[in-house]
Amino acid sequence: MKVDRFYTLDNLLPLMADEAKLVFMVGCTSNYKEMLLSFICRAKYLGIPNVLIVAFDEALYDFAYLQGLPVYLENSADQYKSFIDNDRICVFGSECFKRVSKLKSMSVLKVLKKGYSVLWSDIDIVWFENPLPHLLAFRSGALVIQSDEPDENLPENSILGMNSGFYLARSDEKTIHAFEAIVGHAMKSNKTEQPSFYAVLCGEKGERRVGERECAIEEHNGLHTVFLGHRQFPNGHVFLHWDSGNATKSCEEKECILLHNNFIAGKENKLKRFVVNDLWFYDVRNRMCIQPWHPSRSGAMPLSVFQTETLASLNITEPTL
């Protein structure tokens, strides 16, 4: 069902931003719509209702709009229409996936130029609590970003150890200049946008690293990039939370603020991880957010039964990883 494009970036931003002109943003294509709803359900449970959704294809805009969610269609996606074919083509590592990934930084740059700061999160990240207060505790004016270094014993800012799936970018001149450089670098690359973040912010060979958790660049008025710690903001490999048998308990021991479901290929494998670790927050069959009293949380139904039903609803037949 096609719907009119009532929502635009310009009319949503004033409604979604907080008093400090900061907005939470996520974005995806329509083949990740269930994962998007699980993320939004979790955000609402944490008391974060103002998550702005960037649709990277028309089908996702139509779907989110009919769900009553604040969504706008990223116009830059038009140039990638021939590559976007949902489940059949736009999979991890494909040309479509690489090109669509670059829409994220392009979308954020537009928002920064309009005078709004952005907390960007990929939707394959579980938030255990609102991360914003922790991010605002870092130095003013710094770009705060997640580390992608897989070894918790190595520095967070190791070579190419930057994850563009979670960061806080403030709307100031130096950050805007840096994002312009990131977008420009990514457009010339045959990779995803992520290596472009590191190349611009830390240098192609990491020559702009400062200590073990920062990078600094003179070209953009001295912008500092601060890497979030492995312990509280882990990617999908450090400490092997996902392989522990109980990712929530493992993360509680390390006092995680969030946990990224990366370092695993394929949408189905990501979904399995969420479901079998009880970190899935959308009831696909009943089309509602999973509440504390829901069978998966209250013990009214064996967890394995709910997991199996949820995986079946997501067209995933194998109940375990």
Image (cartoon, rainbow, N blue to C red):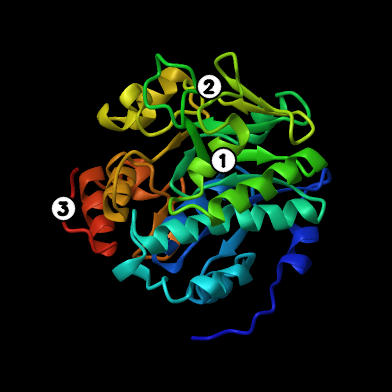
Query: Where is mark 1, residue-wise?
Result: 197
Q: Who's the residue at 37% across and 73% down the image? A: 85
Nearest the viewer among 178 and 15 is 178
- Taking 302 as reference, is 191 left or right? right
Query: Is tag 2's residue or tag 1's residue first in the polypeptide sequence?
Result: 1
Nearest the viewer among 129 and 155 is 155
Q: Is residue 51 visible?
A: no
Q: Quadrant of residue 297?
A: top left
Q: Who's the residue at 54% across and 36% down the image? A: 198
Nearest the viewer among 117 and 314 is 117
Mark 2 and mark 3: span between their CA atoms? 34 Å
The amino acid pointed to by label 3 is: Glu
Query: Where is mark 2, residue-wise?
Result: 229
Q: Nearer the viewer, mark 2 or mark 3?
A: 2
Query: Where is mark 3, residue-wise?
Result: 318
Mark 2 is surrounded, within 10 Å at the Cα level, by few (under 14), some (14 to 19) or many (20 or more) other residues, namely: some
Q: Is residue 146 visible?
A: yes
| Spot occupied by residue 99 in the image (x, y as percentages of width and height) | 47, 60
266 shown above or below 67: above
Mark 2 and mark 1: span between their CA atoms? 18 Å
Nearest the viewer among 181 and 263 is 181
Q: Who's the residue at 43% across and 56% down the image? A: 98
- Taking 222 as reference, is 213 left or right? left
Mark 1 and mark 3: span between their CA atoms? 36 Å
Q: Nearer the viewer, mark 2 or mark 1?
A: 1
| Spot occupied by residue 114 in the image (x, y as percentages of width and height) | 80, 56
| Spot occupied by residue 74 in the image (x, y as percentages of width and height) | 61, 68
